[in-house]
Amino acid sequence: MSGIYIHIPFCQSKCFYCDFYSVTKNEGRDGFADLMIDEIKLRSDYLINKQVDTIYFGGGTPTLLHPSYLEKILVQLHEMYEVSKDAEITIEANPDDLTPGLLTRYLQIGFNRISIGTQSFFDEHLKLMNRRHNAAQAKDAVMMAAKYGFGNISLDLIYGIPGMSSDEWEQNLDVAAGLPANHISAYHLTIEPGTRFGKLKKAGLFSEIPDSESVEQYLKLISLLGARGFEQYEISNFARNKRVSRHNSKYWTGEPYLGLGPSAHSFNGTQRHWNPASLAKYSTDIRAKKLPKGETIDSTMHRNEYVMTRLRTAAGIEKSGFRSEFGEAAWSELLDMADEHISKGYLVLENERIRFDTEAWFRSDGILSDLFLL
């Protein structure tokens, strides 16, 4: 089964940490659905298998697009693809955009999962990050989504926020776990060049928290959510009652997906393509029926991405799957490359499977680079 990602690039304001492509102007919003439909038709042959079981509307802020436009896009996808009856269809939302009427409408047009960008339940954290909702709205939005019929709710949290105390992080986790959400994505605040935080850091006015605090908060995340029934299935993702994100899991298990909209990426098993991170350029290309740039994934790239994505998950890399994909010699080579980290306890080898030790997961980037072929 394949997945489809729709990037809606519109935002009312830019969060200070965000480096995803978005625009804060209304220009182009009304005609965007028609552009999307043109791209759906233009790239109808990209996915070898027409069967789709996940559709994800992300951004940006998809809830800024009128429901009738979202419905128009969904109808076109159902016409072009065999969308399974139990497909997971997700919409990302800002807490302050949600109303009872809007939630009811989303359910009516086919959404059955909602991902709410709560980020924190402290007003001072939200103001620091230039989020446009407050803590009360964050809680109310999750409760409202459940009340009006969403049985599959995810929420986002950010840790590593400068000035956030250990007690505040615990309270954030406690509030999140007490809400009717069955999925939590928790990300460490990163300072990316070009963002507001990146510019402040360059000017010496903003900086990351110490590594020791980051590790402490990450371990607290795992332990406290685990105690509240959330199982960690990926570095940053936790699910209760087995409600993993079926769409995002495709990225970690190498399943094909089609990305539509400006800056969206696609993968069909052998090639990767990406749309321009510019609404103007994207619009021009689609009207000219110009396909996005791409690359063919060679054997080394495929092997390295397999290692990187699967080690992000709790399941890790299973010998039988890796060996069938790359051969017995490649498995032996991987074990040799991983040996030092296994001996140090950062990686765990058991039941013919390699996975990260829980405490080493936070430092995974440096370890992963040692496992890549050059």
Image: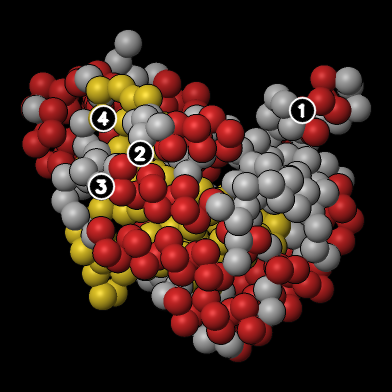
Choose the circle earlier in sequence order: 2 or 1: 1
Disc 2 to disc 3, how far (Cα)?
A: 13 Å
Which label belongs to residue 266? 2
**25 or 5: nearer the viewer:** 25
Residue bearing the label numbered 3: 44
Residue type marked 4: Gln
Q: Secondary structure at mark 2?
A: strand
Q: Position of residue 201 (x, y in %)?
A: 82, 25
Residue at 24% x, 41% y: name it: 46
Please name which of the two marks, 2 or 1, marks the residue nearer to the observer.
Answer: 2
User: Residue furthest toward the top?
Assistant: 374
Residue at 24% x, 60% y: name it: 81
Residue bearing the label numbered 1: 198
The answer to whether one can see residue 368 in this image is yes
Choose the circle earlier in sequence order: 2 or 3: 3
Choose the circle earlier in sequence order: 4 or 2: 2
Q: Residues within 10 Å of mark 2 (few under 14, many from 20)?
A: many
Q: Are marks 2 and 1 in contact (CB under 8 Å)?
A: no
Q: Position of residue 328 (x, y in %)?
A: 8, 27
Which label belongs to residue 271? 4
